[in-house]
Image (cartoon, rainbow, N blue to C red):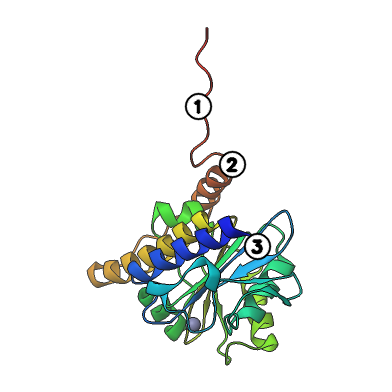
Amino acid sequence: MLLESLRTDLVRYARKLAMSGLVRGTQGNLSARDTASGCLCVTPSATEYETLTPEDIVVLDAGGAIIEGRWKPTVETPTHLRVYRERPDVGAVIHAHAPYVTAFGVAYQPIPLVLEEAALCLGGPVPIAPYAMSGTEAFAQLVVSALGQGAAVVWGNHGLLVAGPSLKQAYAMAHACEDNAQAYLLAKQLGEPRVLPDDEVARLHRYWLEAYGQRPLPSPPT
Ligand SMILES: [Zn+2]
């Protein structure tokens, strides 16, 4: 089986996404890019997360042609392909129906950053892409334009897309975005939420890009 390790990871994160409530039923889709070959692993259309296996994952070349797989890839494949084409820094894309994030996409209000965790991995307010029927090239263009060089974008009247360096980071970003949206909306019941200043968001995001995460500890002096 081609790209077995990446396909196994994709299944693991797909299940985590479903278990954490960011998708329900067969909603949402995930993909990851193999840096060596440039090939993409994507979830199949109408994914049943509970029974998904690495063999169900579809492998595509960078142009979207199926290299290996027994199912049709997700209907959102044109958007995944377009994100990878425009953003060489992106290694994984997750589309989820995160409920609090989606509320902002229904109200067409960009999501301000109020949580440190979200500032670290998102690096700026999350924009809203205009509504269009998803799954088409025209829709993919709308999403990529709204995403720009950012980490996340909300699809108007639909859901969330995050574009991260790896599956692990994209998964963390999706959760941080949902937690931030929820905290903002709850805080709004209490008063006016205090949004993190732009320069602090920039500082936190720079730290996340450069230093955050597990690295091997330096060897102790002998
Ligand atoms: Zn969707």
Q: Nearer the viewer, residue 107 or 58?
A: 58
Mark 3 — residue? Answer: 2
Of the numbered discs 2 and 1, the one sitting upstream in the chain is 2
SS for dot 1 = loop
For label 2, the SS is helix
Please name whichever residue, 78 or 99, is drawn nearer the observer in this view of the structure: 78
**Which amino acid type is marked by label 2?**
Glu
Q: Is disc 3 surrounded by few (<14), some (14 to 19) or many (20+) residues within 10 Å? A: some
Q: Using the numbered discs, state the Cα–Cα distance from disc 1 to disc 3 in whole angstroms.
A: 33 Å
Q: What is the quadrant of the N terminus in the image? A: bottom right
Q: Is residue 112 visible?
A: no
In the image, residue 151 above or below residue 189: above
Residue 139 numbered tag: none
Residue 38: which quarter of the image?
bottom right
Foreground label between 1 and 3: 3
Which residue shows up at 36% across the image and 74% down it?
100
Residue 46's spot in the image, x, y percent?
A: 48, 84
Residue at the extreme left:
190
Percent x, y of residue 190:
23, 68
